Amino acid sequence: MQSAMPDNALQRMLFSMIGNDRVIWSDQDMEALIEDKHNVNADLFSVIDFITNGFNKIDLVIKRGAKEDAEIVEKGELYDLIQTPNPSQSQDEFFALGLKFKLVTGNWMIWGPRRFDKGPIIELWNLPSQYTKILSGGWAKPVKGFTLEVISGRSIPLNVEEVLHIREPNLSYNGQGEELYGMSRLKPGSYPVDINNSAQTAEKARFDNRGAAGFLTVLGADSAKEGLKASQDIKNQVRRQAKGSENEGALVATGYDVKFTPTTVSAVDLGVFEGQRRTLHQLCNLYHIPPILFDPTVANTYNNIREAQKDAYRNAVIPEVQQFCTDFNRWIGDSYKGEWIDFDTSGIECLQSDQQAMAAWLNTAWWMTPNQKLAAQGLPLSDDPEMDKVYIPSSLIPLVDEPIPEALKSIRDYR
């Protein structure tokens, strides 16, 4: 029989090259992800903004007790902390900023100073993830603390118990501790973002430098002077015959033999629009957002939009809320005497059709107790003992007790 691995042996192997009191640096340039990608790309900004807005539309609720019979709490220290994280930010502003850090850099770091060790948190502040570094305690304690590298060059040490680090998965294990940071989705998505940026730059340059559409050459002119005079005559004919709304769609007639040479190439011919459209779809895929919500060229209907909105909440928004609640509850532990944070999606309009379908189905599920039906809908359970009983419809009669009609007995003769 193989002996069990000694305590911390795996951790020793994974983090053997990390020194004590060493600042660990990410292999990602988080500042460049923010400044060169998120802050300059309209499509990327819009997709991320959609998720953060969706996050803030979901209600965060405080509960007390075991999950199966928890009660909703609407006052107290934890309730006040979530409602007003700090004096300078509203709840929506705080969560939008923190979630954007995570969606862009892969890391959401929250500083929450406590009244005393393992006590209630005083305030919540988002740390700029591009300037917040992990301080290692060696292989025995890979994350010993954090440091905030401020612009002035000073570093501010932060206690590890006072920082909540929510991160994306990172598969890069190199023994240097880089895997302790979350990996930004823009690392594999760098190529489509750069192409999208280039397409937008090319389109802007085309408009800035478009100038004349081309030049006109008069064929058969005996001299340059005669050709210029003929060109001016043609311009005057165009002004007379094509100017004004009354001449919309009119044909311009001229007796000169001319040749037009274009000096610009359309955005369609350059493939600019198609390139932007393709990379937009790739960006949406990175964040699990249906492209139909951002691409006006996709044929859509009201029902298609509604289904796309539901998919966006299920695959992009709600997972972010779930991760926050899970990590936050682990962080606070029992600091609030059995209180914890949960979320409620009943206020999201596009998800209510699912609730209506569930309510209709539960209405026919006679084998479930009323309290089980409440739990299935995420509603508080009732203390009434009658709500824990199964109620059978009066129309249901056991087959063994029902006499067989005479008309059906004759069927046996044909077997």
Image (cartoon, helix red, strand yellow):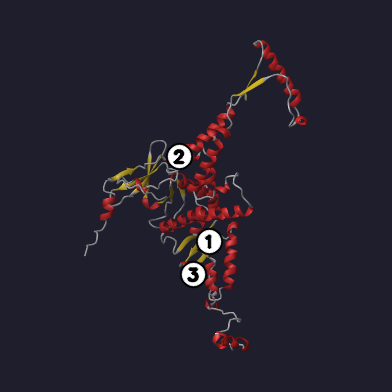
The answer to whether one can see residue 42 in this image is no
- Cα separation, mark 3 vs mark 1, equals 19 Å
Q: Which quadrant would residue 256 be assigned to in this image?
A: top right
Q: Nearer the viewer, residue 282 or 325?
A: 282
**Looking at the image, do the residues carrying marks 3 and 2 touch, with CB atoms under 8 Å apart?**
no
Dot 1 lies on which element?
Answer: loop
Q: Which mark is drawn over residue 75?
A: 1
Dot 2 lies on which element?
Answer: helix
79 shown above or below 289: below
Give the number of the mark in front: 2 or 1. Answer: 2
Q: Which mark is drawn over residue 191?
A: 2
Give the farthest residue toward the front: 414
Mark closer to the chain start, 3 or 1: 3
Report x, y in % for residue 286. Answer: 48, 47
Q: Which quadrant would residue 327 be assigned to in this image?
A: bottom left
Q: Which mark is drawn over residue 69?
A: 3
